[in-house]
Amino acid sequence: MPRTEPRTVPPGQRLVAELPVQHYGRVPVLSPETWTLSIVGETAGPDRVLTWEDLQALPRDTLVADQHCVSKLTSQDVVWEGVLVRHVVDLAPPADGAGHVLVSATYGYSASLLLDDLISPRSLLATHRNGDPLAAERGGPVRLVVPHLYGYKGPKWVGEIAYLREPVRGFWEQRGYHLVGDVWRQERYSYQE
Ligand SMILES: Nc1nc2c(c(=O)[nH]1)N[C@H]1C(S)=C(S)[C@@H](COP(=O)(O)O)O[C@H]1N2
Ligand SMILES: [Mo]
């Protein structure tokens, strides 16, 4: 999937060749065999737990996108491969009126997103980065990538999507960062909400 975002550096960002590996806490040891993704909360039907095999059965896409950290570093043209979030959401769709999600990862990291951003056309559950299976420190086996949002909206080692009627603040949103986090609108801090 070709890029659709402009190939300009977003306002306030500085270009680096490769975004350093950045996350809070330790790198968990996960394997595809034990990885699962739970879809819970305000679902239209039953909750769903997806295995690696379930994920592999879905259509795959490749996209070229930039990575933007809210701390102002950007690196361009990262090649991500995986499954578009909309395919996964179709397996366990949200109930009417559930406009928010909390996406959680191993070791307590979480990110709050608008449902519309989670299911935006280029939102991907990535299993590969620049042609290689996702390294553990980059979020392997599976991480969320939403190219138009700051990196904190993309949990590595993603394990749960919870649909919500009202927003619940995740790890960085509780620490003063923006509930939406659009890089082109420069939505960095909670005082801008
Ligand atoms: N589980 C988890 N995912 C995370 C984080 C984290 O601390 N824990 N940090 C986020 C932040 S702030 C950024 S900028 C990106 C960094 O991704 P990278 O290590 O591939 O550069 O991961 C995001 N995903
Ligand atoms: Mo970040």
Image (cartoon, rainbow, N blue to C red):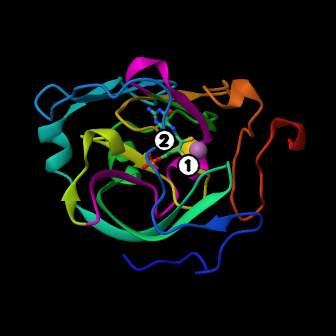
Q: Position of residue 133 (x, y in %)?
A: 19, 53
Residue where numbered disc 1 is placed: 151
Left or right, 93 with respect to 54, comes to: right
Secondary structure at badge 2 equals loop
Closer to viewer: mark 1 or mark 2: 2
Q: Considering only vertical position in the picture, is 114 above or below 64? A: above
Q: Image point 16% across, 38% down: which residue?
A: 52
Q: Position of residue 124 (x, y in %)?
A: 39, 54
Left or right, 164 with respect to 57, comes to: right
Task: Give, as a three-letter code, the residue at label 1.
Answer: Gly
Q: Position of residue 98 (x, y in %)?
A: 60, 33
Residue 71 vs residue 110, the one in the foreground? 71
Secondary structure at badge 1 equals helix
- The quadrant in which residue 136 appears is top left
Q: Residue furthest top?
A: 108
In magenta segment, residue 107: yes
Q: Image point 58% across, 36% down: which residue?
A: 96
Q: Position of residue 63 (x, y in %)?
A: 37, 69
Q: Is mark 1 within 8 Å of ligand 1?
A: yes
- The quadrant in which residue 191 appears is top right
Task: Tell me how many marks there are.
Answer: 2
Start-end of magenta stretch: 105-130
In magenta segment, residue 125: yes
Left or right, 22 with respect to 92, comes to: right
Residue where numbered disc 2 is placed: 22
Q: Is mark 2 within 8 Å of ligand 1?
A: yes
